[in-house]
Amino acid sequence: MTVLCWRILCGVSAGAFVGVSVLLLCLHLLKNRYYHNYHDDELIKTERTDNSLNTLYFTHGETRKYIKKYVICKTVYDKFLVCNFADKCAHILYYVLQYNSRKRPIAVLRVEEDITGDSSKVIALDRRCAFVNVVAGTADGVALNTDVIRPLSVNRIRLHAFLKSFALFLGLFVLRHVLIELIAGNMFLRQYLTHLFNYIAVGGSFVLAVLHYFITVQCLRGKNGKRLSGGNLTYDFL
């Protein structure tokens, strides 16, 4: 291949890299899908003290049978939540869906408590949190909601991994060529581009991209499994 052909390939790859990167940002393939939409819980009262602003809400739906009310406490330094149980439970699991001021989800907490009293433990909230929904999971062996976030589909995981890996290959291809142009200069450029090392570098970039694809798929499927077994819920909340 001539020097001109390599330069054209580099330019096309740079354009494709930008296009694939924009596509990844627009598709939001890792965006969470929820089993529960945001619900405007009934506000009971708002109370201001010397140190905090406390807003008390009723829960909604079947959750109210187990968790009747909750209060969001905002201080200068932090935010936290305390739930009021409707009855004592030997074991209860519930989810706290946190939303920002525009009522967009920002985080989900999975909380478990044993031998409950009237009130829950103090639950720290994200500083961006303005609203929450409390969703009961299980109470004394009664399953109400096994999860609140839908698992990522295999197709979405694979498409995300493919686009990221393709972008990685394109980026490495462009970087390799730019470095060759800078280091080799016009005098040795043609000699290097026709050398075996050049094709090894391209092949190595391809191998790295393939490995990146399989590692990404494995990691995201592992996150799905961890989340379903009670791990941290950390995906894209955009």
Image: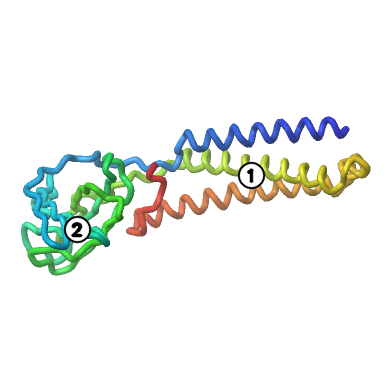
User: Given the image, on which type of amino acid does mark 2 rest?
Assistant: Leu
* Percent x, y of residue 195: 89, 45
Tell which tag, 2 or 1, sits nearer the viewer.
2
Q: Left or right? Give the position of 17 relative to 33.
A: right
Q: Earlier in the sequence, mark 2 or mark 1?
A: 2
Residue sitting at x 55%, y 43%? 161
Q: In this rendering, does residue 90 appear at all?
A: yes
Classify mark 1: helix, strand or loop: helix
What is the distance, in whole Å, between disc 2 and disc 1 at their CAs? 42 Å
Classify mark 2: helix, strand or loop: strand
Q: Nearer the viewer, residue 45 or 136?
A: 45
Residue sitting at x 81%, y 35%? 6
Determine which residue is flagged by label 2.
Answer: 81
Q: Nearer the viewer, residue 209 or 229?
A: 209
* Percent x, y of residue 39: 19, 40
Q: Residues within 10 Å of mark 2 (few under 14, many from 20)?
A: many
Q: Nearer the viewer, residue 60 or 154?
A: 60
* Percent x, y of residue 163: 57, 39
Q: Left or right? Give the position of 160 relative to 109.
A: right
Q: Residues within 10 Å of mark 1 (few under 14, many from 20)?
A: many
Dividing the image into 4 quarters, which one contains the C terminus?
Answer: top left
Residue sitting at x 24%, y 53%? 96
Q: Left or right? Give the position of 199 relative to 104.
A: right
115, above or below 107, in the image = below
Determine which residue is flagged by label 1.
Answer: 168
* Percent x, y of residue 2: 88, 32
Residue at the extreme bottom of the image, as rendered: 115
Place residue 34 in its image quadrant: top left
